[in-house]
Amino acid sequence: MKNERWSVDAVRDEIVSAIAEVRFVARSEHDEHRAHAADWLEEQFIDAKDGHALREASAKAFTLYGGMGSFSDVGTASSAHAVDRLAAALRHGRSWFPRTP
């Protein structure tokens, strides 16, 4: 991303695109758990129409990250790339908008 402020739509699109990549990789690797998690993630962003909602959805999505056995515990380069891209997009969603509505 550039150093300029992005619109809610642009950041949400970045996140949704990253989720789609996670889903694609998960399905190609027959990783049902991560594919279902991608579906859940996408649902979190359907109604995120303003900065506050996008920030909340991004924070909620980060609950999937953690140590061993978590969403971010990957086994292939493709999966690692997709999960890292998603984490970067979620950081944008969490940090580019104010904490209060």
Image (cartoon, rainbow, N blue to C red):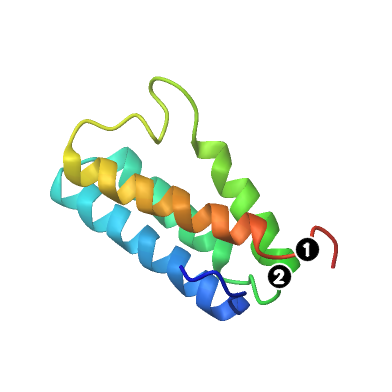
Q: Which residue is mark 1?
A: 98
Mark 2 nearby-residue class (10 Å; few <14, some 14–19, many ≥20) = many
Find numbered disc 2 in the image and state the secondary structure of the residue it sits on.
helix
16 vs 23, left or right, is right
Give coordinates of residue 84: x percent, y percent.
36, 46
Image point (55%, 69%), residue name: 3
* Comes first in the chain, label 1 or label 2: 2
Q: Which mark is residue 67?
A: none
Which residue is tagged 2?
Answer: 51
Residue type pointed to by label 2: Gly
Contact between marks 1 and 2 (CB within 8 A): the answer is yes
Q: What's the amino acid at mark 1? A: Pro
Q: Is residue 39 left or right of residue 5?
A: left
Query: Which sits in the foreground, 55 or 46?
Result: 55
Point out the residue furthest to the front here.
3
Relative vertical location of residue 24 with respect to residue 9 in this rendering, above or below:
above
Tell me if residue 34 comes above or below residue 100 in the rendering. Answer: above
Q: Residue at x 37, y 61 (%)?
A: 18
Q: Compared with residue 4, is residue 43 higher up or lower down, i.e. above or below?
A: above
Classify mark 1: helix, strand or loop.
loop
| Quarter of the C terminus within the rendering | bottom right
Horizontal and vertical percent position of residue 39: 41, 56
Residue 78: give x, y in percent of width and height: 19, 46
Q: Relative to residue 87, is residue 47 drawn left or right?
A: right
